[in-house]
Each structure stands twice: as C-alpha cells, then as structure tokens.
Amino acid sequence: ATSEGYGGFFGKTNGADIRDFSISGTLTVAAGTGSGVVGWAESSTISNIQSALVIEVPNSGAHHTGGVVGSARGTNTISGCTFTGSLTVADGSTDNFAGIAGYITNGDKVINCGNFGTFTFSASGCAAGGIVGYVNATQATIQNCLSTGQITFSGEGTPTYGAAIIGRTKGFSADLVKNNFWLEGTAYGTIHNNDGSEAMETGSVTAEQLASGEVAYKLGEAWSQIIGTDDIPALGTDAPVFYVGEAGYATLYDTTTGYEFNGDVTASVAVLTDTWLELTEIGKVPAGTPVILMGTYFNKTAANLPAIDIENDLKGTDVATEADGTMYVLAKPAEKEVGFYKATGTIPAGKAYFQSNAGVKAFFFDGDDATGIENLNNQDTLNTPIYNLAGQRMSKMQKGINIVDGKKILK
C-alpha cells in the first residue's frame, strides 16, 4: 500500500476500539502526516496488534510514521502491541518515526508494547525511537515497554535523535515514563531531549539479563517467558516469571499441584540438626511439600509427581495463619543472616515455616552455624534463663547446645 496522509489499514480514527489482529505487507509512505497500521488516532483504544509491516519512507515529505500508529493526537491508549517488521527512512527526512507510535502528545498512553524490528535512517534531524519517535508533551505515559530491535544510523556524524525508547521528547514526567527496557548496543541512548542531550540513561539491559527472566519479571504481569527456551520476553501470560527475592531465598507451599522449575532455582527440604537446619535439595516438588527456594528468577511448570519419602521439618499453610509464638518464617533482617526468625502477625498463604518450642530468636542453615551458635562465658549467663533444644528450662548450662537469651550457645 502507498500512504499520502492518514494512511494505513485504518486512515484516521476518533473514539475507535481497534484490537486483536496481526498484519504484514509493505507500506510505502509517500507524503502527508500519519502513517501506520492506524495513520492518525484520536481518543482511541488500540490493543494487541502484532505488526510485521515493511515500512519505507523514500522522501522527506512524510511526517509521523509508526509500526502501529503514525500520529496519536491525545487520550489514546496503545497497549499490548508489537512491531517485528522493518522501517527504512530516506536521506533528508527530519520527522518522527518509531516501532510503535511515531508521534504522541498529552494524554496518550503507550503501555506494555515491544519493538523487535529493525530501523535504518540517515538524516541527523530525524527522531527515530524504538517505542515512540517524538513525545511532544510533558504528560504522556510510556510504561513497561521493551525494545530489542536494532536502530542503525547510516549517515555521517552522530544522529541528533535516535534512541531505543523515545527518539525525542519535549519533556516528560518520571512518574509517567518508567519501567522501560532496551537491549544494550541497539541504539546510542534511551531518551533524547529536544536539544539532543540524553534525558535518561537507565533501562539498558544485556542479552544475559533478557534470557534470565529478570526483564520479563520487571516488566510486569503482561509479559512472560519460558526461561531456558525463550531468549527474550514476550507479551502474554502463558509463562509468568517469578522472583525468589533479594536475599536469594524464599519459601513455597502448594497443595494444588506438583511442579518443576525453569531457571536457576533449586528447591530444598529442611531437617533440624543439633545446630542448624540442614537443607536437602529435591529438584521436583510434589504437591503439598513445603520447600525453601534458592536462586533468582524462575517459572513453575505443573507436574503430576508422586510423594517423596524424605524427612522434612518444614510445615506449610494454604491459608493466612496467625503466628502463635512457636512459628518461624524465612527472613533476612538488616545486617543479619538469612534464616528462620520467630514470626509475628500473619503468615501468608502459600508459605512454608518452621515450628519449635525452643524459644530461640532464629534458626540458620547448614554452613551458617557460626551465626546461630555463639560461645559465651558462664558469667554472661548467671542471671539469664537457660533452656535446652526441647524448650525445657535448666538451672545451668549443660554440655552441648543451650538456649540463652534466645541464642544457641555451645558448651
């Protein structure tokens, strides 16, 4: 098709709801303003469109071209859209081009969109953006978007505008433009101001970060990825990515199904020894087995698994449960080791816990016993209640492990 203004599968919309289809083919932009799947959009909802268009802009008479929307003119919502085609802009052009929307203004929203196409432009005055070409506003929203497509400047010198998320912006609110990511090396910046200076340096990620599931998790629930199979995130909810947490440990308890993992996560059961919780890795997790997770990002895959015959002192709760003074939950207090600390308040559903009447402040893992057992002299314990591991009070410390002031003491 050839566009000469308001050009595309839909030329101009106002108050429209356009959604749920894929499109391919070649679009040659001859002249005019607004070319894309939707050329010019006003007050419209444009969602779940997969564009693989080959877009060619052979002269300087074209304005506002996008892989999905050419020119958005206020109060539009563009969401769940992707561009996997190509965009080639000729010499001499000084206007705005992008994988999702060439131009947006106040009130427009671009959310959960991805640019995976390739761009080539040679004019330094061009505003080429992976997601948006030009934001001619300060109150536009661009959030949870990903750009991994290569943006190549073929002219001489350094391009004035050519960035992975926004090619050029009049200004933006950090509350509205946030949580967007781009693959390092695919463009020379993230967002550029009107004067060509870089407005934001954050958001660059490596191929390893993309493959690990980290970016899919950070992008939010609209994105998914089968870790170990998919190199990059994709829109959809078939394979949600979970995060163990900053401490590298978490607990899990699921009575509905067994499961396996994608990612670097391992699952272990725990048994109390004389000095610590000894962890045993089990790999696959049968339904109703409380476990400790170690790792970073992962998928859960449901699996019908037989019960395992292995000792496990962990317990689990499938409903929110009030702690009763004997329950310990996984935690990492500031400047302390990861361990099971005495719970207060409510233990959330789906979590594992450890239960003991010993009265200690915390239980630690095998290998961290030095943090759980502290050697004190007898003078320090003269006026402090002493207990054994069974929670029985004693008149003095006995050989072995003693509980003194909530701490495990080795005599």
Image (cartoon, rainbow, N blue to C red):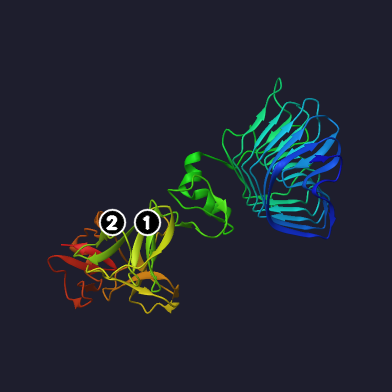
Query: Disc 1 and disc 2: Cα gap in Å?
Result: 9 Å
Q: Residue 84 appears at what percent x and percent y?
A: 63, 43
**Is 151 rendered above or below residue 350?**
above
Secondary element under disc 1, as helix, strand or loop, is loop
The residue pinned by badge 1 equals: 336
Q: Work out which quarter of the rendered image holds the N terminus and state it.
A: top right
**Is 14 rendered above or below residue 390?**
above
Q: Residue 88 appears at what percent x and percent y?
A: 72, 32
Residue 91: quadrant of the picture: top right
Instruction: Report how many numbered discs are placed on residues in the image.
Output: 2
Q: Amino acid at mark 2?
A: Thr
**Crowd around label 2: few <14 · some 14–19 · many ≥20 (10 Å):** some
Q: Residue at x 38, y 74 (%)?
A: 255
Q: Residue at x 59, y 40 (%)?
A: 148
Q: Amino acid at mark 1?
A: Lys
In the rendered structure, the answer to whether residue 342 lies left or right of residue 147 reads: left
Q: Residue 278 appears at what percent x and percent y?
A: 24, 61
Whether residue 198 is visible, yes or no, is no
Q: Residue 250 appears at what percent x and percent y?
A: 39, 61
Please report contact status of discs 1 and 2: CB closer than 8 Å, yes or no.
yes
The residue pinned by badge 2 equals: 371
Secondary element under disc 2, as helix, strand or loop, is helix
